[in-house]
Structure formats: C-alpha cells, structure tokens
Image (cartoon, coloured by chain):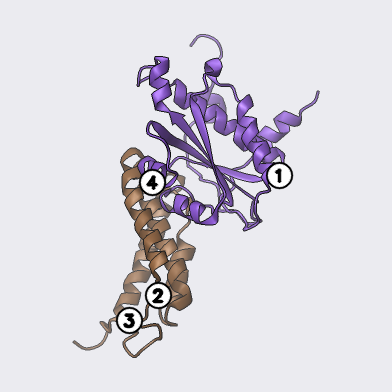
C-alpha cells in the first residue's frame, strides 16, 4: 500500500531503509557494551531521527509534523553531561509530543 | 616564528556534516600518504589502511557504524594486523598498537584539514561487521575510521559538557 487511506495505513519505509535501521540497531547494541552509558540515549535518538528522516517523504500529513519535531528534537551530539536537567526536560518534552500524537491518532480523547 | 603547523592544529575541527562532493583521487592519496610520516614506535608496519570510496560500500560501512553521523564520500579505515603484532612479540595487553592508531589518525585528520577537506574520526562501529564488509584478512581488525569529504556549511553543535576540569587543571609541571 503506498497511498494514504482512511485508516492512515501508509507505507513509510522501504526495504533499504529498514535494513539500514536494522544494521544500525544491531551494531549499536554491540558498541554500547564498550561505550559510556551516556551514549545509549544518544544512539537511540539518532535511530529515531533517522527513522523520522526516512519516513517523512511518504508519511501522511497528520504524521509529518511529529516526524519533524522528532528530527528537530534529536541533536545527534547532545549528551546528558552537557546540560543534565535540560537534557531530561527535552526528552520528556519529546515523549509528551509522541504521547499526544498517539492520543489523537488512536482517538483516545473521545468517549470510550 | 612560522606558526603554520600550529595554526592548522588549532583550526582543525571534526566535520560531522559533509556535502555530496567527491574527494579527488590526488587529495585522497595525499591524506593517505601522510600516515607514512606519523610517529609509529619502531616503524614496525603493524597497521593496515583500507580506503573506501564506492558509494554502496560507504553506505554499508555507515550502517554498521553507529558513531558515524556524517555521510562521507571517502573513508580510510585504520586497522591493526594483530597476527603481526603477536609475531612481533607484543603481549595482547600492550597498548602500543592502539597508540599508533591514534598517531596515524591525528596525522590523517591534520593532513585532510591542510588540503581543505573535512574529516572526522569514528571509533563506534562493530569491528566484526566492518571486517566482514571490508573482507579483511584474518587477524586484521579495524580500529578507527577517518571519514573524509567536504565540510557542509552547517555543522551539528560540538559535544558540550558542564563542569569538569579546566585545561590547566589537566597539566602537571614537574613532580607532583
């Protein structure tokens, strides 16, 4: 399925992109064994940013703003030690943005 | 006083964003040859240098290198021939081969900077995956990648940390 439909089921990732992310995640698991703990969230955010970048061209109009926010909120060089309180605040803000999208897209704010 | 070298050292930066423009063969050769002049203890020739320029190969290298933020148009992978290290008589705990990776990397980065290329080192990658992708001989392990290309105008911010010691706090003059 390549076109947006009623249920917003849109294919946003091609096989090449999926393989790229897969390779990144598997090798990041290995490198993280030897790296400082503060690199773990940075690697995950990089993966999220790359997924958002790959998905954006084919994403629905409803999803695109979220992908843009994720990309903007994922500085690939930010670490917790740079600004410990601000780092957690930015992550929480990003989590809140994702959760608000889920509430809207899954229709959770209406009557049960 | 001729401060050309000091100026190059002080103005070199890690390029984490590179353009699509290719690195010329002569430029690549010049950077690569600089490693010959890096200070290697004993001039033992225990290191190997693998050059990647094919886009598909570079893409695969990046896929298994989580620390590679940039998309290089060329890369030099500094490897250690651990079989030769063993034959030379080094114990596995001897840090010498790693120290020489560092001197080679510093020289390569500075050489790239001196001819106007953007460059950045990467050490966060799967050694096993990269050795497989590069089809390295048994016993030869990749230890550091120098990404090469042309630096983009906009760069991600440098990694910043709060607190920590100042530069002078890291220096001890004479006996402590």
Q: Is residue B172 visible?
A: no
Chain whose colour in the figure is brown:
A
Q: From the viewer's perspective, is B11 left or right of B124?
A: right
Disc on the earlier residue, 2 or 4: 2
Judging depth in this view, the residue of A57 and A112 nearest the camera is A57
Q: Is residue A12 left or right of residue B43?
A: left
Q: Which numbered mark, 1 or 3, is in the foreground of this view?
A: 1
Q: Position of residue B18 (x, y in %)?
A: 60, 54
Seen from the viewer's position, the closer of residues A37 and B132 is: B132
Asked which secondary structure carries label 1, the reply is: loop
- Which residue position is annotated with label 4? A39
The reply to whether the C-beta atoms of the residues labelled 3 and 4 are less than 8 Å apart is no
Where residue A21 sits, quadrant-wise, is bottom left
Q: Which is in the foreground here, disc 1 or disc 4?
A: 1
Q: Is residue A106 above or below residue B37?
A: below
Chain letter for the part of the structure drawn in purple: B
- The 10 Å Cα crowd at callout 3, few under 14, some 14 to 19, many 20 or more, is few
On whether disc 3 and disc 2 are found on a single subunit, the reply is: yes
State which mark lies toward you, 3 or 2: 2
- Mark pair 1, 4: CA separation: 30 Å
Question: What mark, if any, has residue A12 been given in the picture?
Answer: 2
Classify mark 3: helix, strand or loop.
helix
Location of residue A91 with respect to A40 vertically, above or below = below
Calculate the distance from the C-alpha at mark 3 to the C-alpha at mark 4. Answer: 32 Å
Query: Who's the residue at 37% across and 70% down the image?
Result: A97
Instruction: Quote the CA–CA distance across marks 2 and 4.
Output: 28 Å
């Amino acid at each position: 399925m390549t076109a947006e439909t009623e249920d917003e089921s849109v294919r946003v990732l091609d096989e090449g992109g999926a393989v790229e992310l897969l390779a990144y995640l598997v090798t990041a698991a290995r490198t993280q064994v030897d790296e400082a703990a503060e690199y773990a969230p940075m690697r995950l955010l990089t993966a999220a940013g790359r997924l958002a970048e790959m998905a954006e061209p084919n994403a629905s109009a409803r999803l695109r703003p979220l992908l843009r926010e994720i990309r903007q909120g994922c500085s690939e060089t930010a670490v917790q030690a740079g600004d410990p309180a601000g780092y957690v605040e930015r992550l929480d803000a990003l989590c809140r943005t994702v959760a608000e999208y889920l509430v809207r897209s899954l229709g959770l704010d209406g009557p049960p | 006083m001729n401060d050309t070298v000091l100026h190059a050292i002080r103005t070199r930066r890690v390029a984490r964003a590179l353009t699509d423009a290719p690195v010329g063969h002569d430029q690549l050769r010049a950077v690569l040859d600089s490693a010959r002049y890096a200070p290697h203890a004993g001039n033992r020739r225990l290191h190997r240098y693998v050059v990647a320029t094919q886009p598909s190969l570079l893409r695969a290298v990046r896929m298994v290198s989580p620390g590679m933020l940039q998309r290089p148009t060329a890369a030099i992978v500094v490897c250690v021939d651990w079989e030769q290290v063993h034959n030379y008589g080094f114990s596995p705990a001897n840090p010498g081969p790693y120290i020489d990776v560092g001197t080679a990397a510093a020289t390569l980065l500075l050489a790239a900077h001196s001819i106007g290329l953007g460059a950045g080192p990467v050490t966060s990658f799967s050694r096993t995956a990269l050795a497989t992708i590069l089809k390295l001989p048994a016993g030869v392990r990749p230890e550091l990648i120098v990404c090469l290309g042309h630096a983009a105008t906009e760069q991600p911010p440098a990694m910043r940390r709060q607190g920590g010691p100042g530069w002078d706090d890291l220096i001890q003059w004479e006996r402590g």
